[in-house]
Structures are given as C-alpha cells and as structure tokens.
Amino acid sequence: MQPDRTSASRFFLPVASGILLLALCLAWWMNSRQPTPVSLTPTLTGQPEYCLTCHADLPEISPSHPVQTFGCVICHGGERLALNADVAHSSMRGGQNPSDLSVVEQSCGGSNCHSGSAADNNDHVQRVMSSVQSTYAGAIASILYTFGAEPDLTARFGMHAVSDQVITTQTGVAALEAFDPIQYDHSIIEDFGQNCLTCHINAIPRDGVQYARETGCAACHTPDVNAFPEGQVHRLTTEIPYTQCNTCHNRGNYDLGQMTFVERADQPTTRLQSYYQPIAQFTRCEWTLDCVDCHTRTEAMGDDDIHSNMKDIQYIQCKTCHGTLTELPQTKTLTDPNDIAFRLAQLNPVVDLKLGDTILVTEQGEPLWNTRVLSDGTYELIGKVTKQRFAFRPVMGTGCQQIPDQQASQYCHQCHAVEH
Amino acid sequence: MSSLSRRDFLKLTSQALLAASGLLGLGGLFRFLSYQTGQPPPTKFDLGPAANYLPGSRTVMLNIPAVLLHTERGYSALSMACTHLNCTVDAKETGFACPCHGSKFDMQGALLRGPAQKPLRSLRVEQTAEGKLILYTD
C-alpha cells in the first residue's frame, strides 16, 4: 500500500492548486460580470454607497430628503457596497418600505431625524406609535366593551404594546397592552380580530385598488400608490389628498352582527359621493377641501399621549376657522422666525409665509399655516393639495342663528349642509 | 532537441498551476487590501487668480459647495452646507436658504431661522505669492 500513499500525496498539491486556480478564475469571472459601481458619498453620512449603480433612475423622494445629502442606506438600510442585488438588499429595513412601524425607529427615526424631542418638533415616531391611528385603541376598546369583555370604554389594548411616561392631557392613558383577540375565548371578538383590523396604519390593507396604500408613515405620506406599477412609488409628501385618507376612511361599514367589514357597493364619481355615509350631511368646505386642509398634524399623528379613541384627539370644528357669534377665530401674527408654521409651510409651499403675516390658529395653538387673515377682516385658505384659494368669513356679525353652546358640526349642518 | 518526459511535463504543469494560483491569490489579496470605495472628497481648492473676484462680489461655487466673498476686509468664504443636515443651501439676494428644511442665513452666514442651530461654517482662504486664491474646507 506504500506506493499508493506516495502517489496520493504526490498528486494532492497539484490537484488542490488546480481547484484553487479554478475557484479564483471563477471568482474573477463572476466579479468581471458585476456592473461598474456608481459611488455616492452622502454629505450627511460621509460613507460611500453603491445603490445608484442600479437605482439611478429613481426620482428624488422629496425635496426634504435629497439623495446627495441622505443617500439611500440611512433610510433603507442594506449593504451599501454590495453590487449583487440579493446581497445589497439582504439587510434592508422593512423591505421596500422603511417607514413600516416595525422598523421606523431605525429608519425615519434614525440620526434623530424624526425621533427626538417634542421641543424640537422631532418626535414624529413617538407620536405616531402612540396615536389612535396606529394603536386602533378606540375600535378595540369599543368592541371589548360592547361584547362584555371590558367594563368600560377606557382603552387597555392596542395593536402593539405602548406606554407613556409623561401624560400631558386629561384623556391620556398610561399604557396599552398588545391586543390578542384569542385570549377572551369569545367568537365575536375573535372574528373582530380576524376581519376588522385592516385600518390601523401598519395593517396590510384589504385587497382592491380602493384600499391600496403602504404601511407606517407611508400609509399617508406616500399617496397614490395605484398610479405606479407594482406600487413602487418613491415619494414622501405632506401634500396628502383626501383620496389617500379614503383608502381607510369612507370605504364601508362594520357589521357588528356578523362582525365583518361590509364594503360600500357604489362607485363614487364625485367628490361629495366619496363620503360613504348616505344619511350624513356635509358643508361645502367638507367636500371641497382636502382633509389635511383643516385637520392638523396633531390630530393625524397624535400628541404623544395615548388616547382611548379618536374623539379624544380630534378637535377641529367649524368654529376653529369661523368662530362663533361672540368670538372671532383665534389668530396669531408670526413674529418668531422659528415658528413651526414656517417649517410646515416650507414642506408644502402653497403659501409664502412671511414674518408679520397673521394666520388662524386652532384652540390648541396649532398653526393653520395655509390660512391668512386679510386686511378686510375676512380669511383665506389655500388648499394644501389643490392650491386653490378659498375666501371665508367669520360667523360674528352675520345673521347666523347658532346657539352658543351648540358648536358641533351637526348644528352647522342644519343650515349649511349641501344636498347630495 | 530533447523531448519532455512525462514526469517532467507533470512536474512543470504542477509548478505552473501552483505559480498561477499563487499569483492570482496574491493579486486578489492586493486588490482586497488596496480597494477604495471612493475617493475622499478634496479639501483644498485652487480658485485661480484673486483678480477674478471683484471687490463686493459674492461667488457661488456649488461644486465645493462654498461661496467666496470679497469685501473691504478681504477674501473670506462660507461653506454652503447647511448646519442642520448638510443640504446645500441656495444663495438668495439677502442670504442663504436651505431647500430641505427651511433654515435661513444672512449674507454673512449668521443664522436667521432654524431648524439649523449654528451659522454657516467659515472656510479658510489664502492668497499665494502668485496671486492665486486657495480655499480649504477642512
């Protein structure tokens, strides 16, 4: 057997060398097939990344996030120097949507961009995570109370567990546990969990173009995903049309008897018809404006407190802009160059706000930055989406017959509703 | 002319394979160790003759990005990288405005409006014996 061992050892080195040579040639060949990298070094990170090698045709996501400054990786994650698509995408955050709430703290909230202090107005992620739009606390509390699983309408559960160290409002609650519809051993509540949780902003939407939206921040800030093939839209905006709100709202009703969602059967062709409730009444501004023209960022994204339902956070009423018989709407003359109104107006520049301009503010002091008080005492609102100008006037001094303590919109509808 | 024996041929082939593998391996190692993902941005810029920049002028150089000012006190320069998140600011008639988040600065780079918290960064400008201006961004 001795000759065989000698023969084996004699051939081992050449064979191993040949295999190594083949492997190196293979690696060289594969490397030669890689595209020539297009390097970008974002000014914010200072770290080169090769994403533009394949994605140079993507449009800028927004004027606030230029690629030369931010690059791609700070938001999307991924392997910044990989040229192989699978490797490059292997560690992306949230797949194609880094704003999904499961990763939003690392993506949108990274580098203290949208996850910071309330004083700096950088606490977007914290506010959204505790808002009713993401916790769905109101709907859950309502169902649990209705079917006897909880003693009152106070929210105790949300789509995810969340707690609040500092409660600043009367309706704020300290914490929510993650909702588990199975724990109640109640078929209706299980059906609710199965059929009725598609509207909170991190839920995968129902099938159908009328429901099509992204999740997380992009659920609102990336509108019109239908307009792009396979929903691959690269856009963030505060110019949010009512149609985006309608991917969740006005799409139908819940049938509590069957605990299912009943889709609206009609196909609305007009702006007014887009509202679902057939018996409801609407004033002109409710169907000529977009939702974001009146409803504020705090109402939509939360105020950093956890609330039990939508009513605890939604507060804009007719009188916010129109006042009452005895009070004009609240206004504010912009004297501080760092007023948040300027930053909001800069993000969606439908109006050129200047120091000294007087705008309307809400009862909570939020600027309605797309309004201004005109010299004749009337007001003007510029549509954030349509860019249309709407003139309006205060109730004070008119023949309005409103009763002072009846300020909810249904009282205004009694006289000002439009016909369907 | 002596013919190559089978033994010598195999030996030569083995050595050639070994040498090629070694060279390729060393080449790969060298390439790996010397690989640069991108050139570091330059920090020194030759702006050409100082005479090109008239008194009172404000010259925007977006490739740097910086603005060169020629005032009564001589030449000075400001970085045009916004001190908020490094977006390149736009030069306006009365100063500079950041297109990303709305920070504003006056003609001297002083902060007028946030969210930036600091003024635009001053850059060093030197004039050479030949009359050229050199701008340093580090």
Image (cartoon, coloured by chain):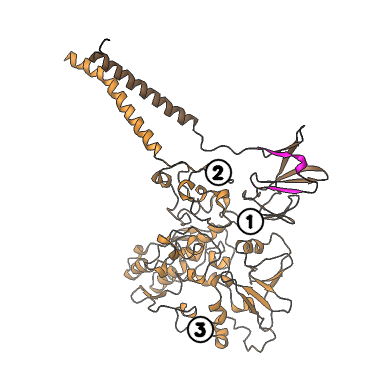
Residue carrying label 3: A281
Q: CA distance from mark 3 to mark 2?
A: 54 Å
Residue A250: image quadrant is bottom left
Horizontally, is A259 left or right of B113 in the view?
Answer: left
Horizontally, is A340 left or right of A205 in the view?
Answer: right
Please report the bounds of the magenta region as a residue range.
B44-62
Q: Which chain is brown?
A: B
Question: Chain A in the picture: what colour?
Answer: orange
Residue carrying label 2: A41
The quadrant of the image that shows the N terminus of chain A is: top left
* A233 or A123, nearer to the observer: A233
Residue carrying label 1: B99
Mark 3 packing: few (<14 Cα in 10 Å), some, or many (20+)? some
* Label whose residue precedes the other's in the sequence (3 or 2): 2
* A139 or B131, nearer to the observer: B131
* B112 or B25, nearer to the observer: B25
